[in-house]
Image: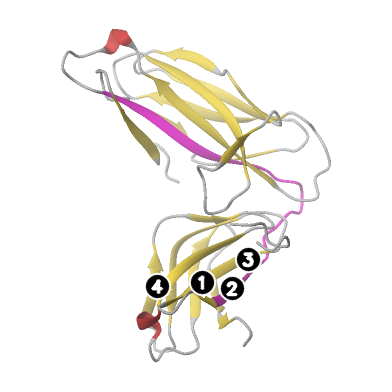
Amino acid sequence: MTRAGLGRGRLALAALVLLLPAAGHAGALSILPSRLSVQPDGRPGTLRLENLSDQPSLVQVEAFAWSDSDQPDALTATKDLIALPAVFALPGGAEQIIRVAFRRPATLAQETSYRVIITEVPQEANRVPGGVNLAVRMSLPVFVTPPGAAPSTAWRLERDGSSGVRLVAQNGGTAHVRMTDLVVVDDAGRPVFERKQPAYVLAGEEQSWRIALDRLKGARNLRVRAESNVGALDVAVAAAGS
């Protein structure tokens, strides 16, 4: 995915569970909220991490820059965002407040996006002979949003080879849009494409989804409908160049 203009979760949610060799207990961490907005003036936002198990956990917290809408795991190291404490022990049944702040207070022209990665570090003390260690790794979107920033999303269809098209959402605005329950319907109300999982289109970025041509056979006057962080969406979509 390239930047537009250059040519281009419930999180306790939406945890990535990593199966690691060597043995132990299954981690059970819960984080609220599942996404966070913080102020560009350096005032911190807060996350509440809870250990739902009766076993202690060792937790590492890291912040990364995120600039590719459809690649939430394509991250780069950054010093712009800080999350503290960075490493801590969390007893079973206990909670920990994590403070997240923008380190270079500034007047931003548009929203910047990051991800905070929270990882449970496997511990030898929790080892179960003959078992495996299930460590929890959670990826949380964090946005530094200037006052007045807002998304502005345009939709189009582009040919994708001989058997499909791409539905493209291009965000020319200054803040992200988050969508769920995305559906494309024809003029008879028949769904030709559906996506239930959350999808983000970052400020100045685009996101796309492939639709098989046979799903569009005879379809005209397509509409995109979705729930979003800026309200319900219901917009017409046209083929590129039409």
Q: Position of residue 136 (x, y in %)?
A: 37, 29
Relative to 191, 128 lies left or right? left
| Residue 206 seen by the camera | yes
First in sequence: mark 3 or mark 2? 2
Q: Name the residue under label 2.
A: 155
User: Which residue type carries mark 2?
Assistant: Trp
Relative to 48, 53 lies left or right? left
First in sequence: mark 4 or mark 3? 3
Determine contact: label 3, label 2, CB under 8 Å: yes
Seen at 63% across and 57% down, the residue is: 2
Q: What stretch is highlighted in magenta?
A: 133-157
Q: Mark 4 points at which residue?
A: 193
Kindly identify which numbered label has been placed on residue 170.
3
In depth, the one of 129 and 143 nearer the eye is 129
Relative to 21, 188 lies left or right? right
Determine contact: label 4, label 2, CB under 8 Å: no
Magenta segment, principal secondary structure? Answer: strand
Relative to 43, 185 lies left or right? left
First in sequence: mark 2 or mark 1? 2
First in sequence: mark 4 or mark 2? 2
User: Which residue type carries mark 3?
Assistant: Gln
Q: Distance between the residues labelled 1 and 3?
A: 10 Å
Q: Distance between the residues labelled 4 and 2?
A: 14 Å
Q: Position of residue 197 (x, y in %)?
A: 41, 56
Magenta segment: does it hold 148?
Answer: yes
Q: In this view, does 53 lie above or below 198?
A: above
Kindly identify which numbered label has been placed on residue 167.
1
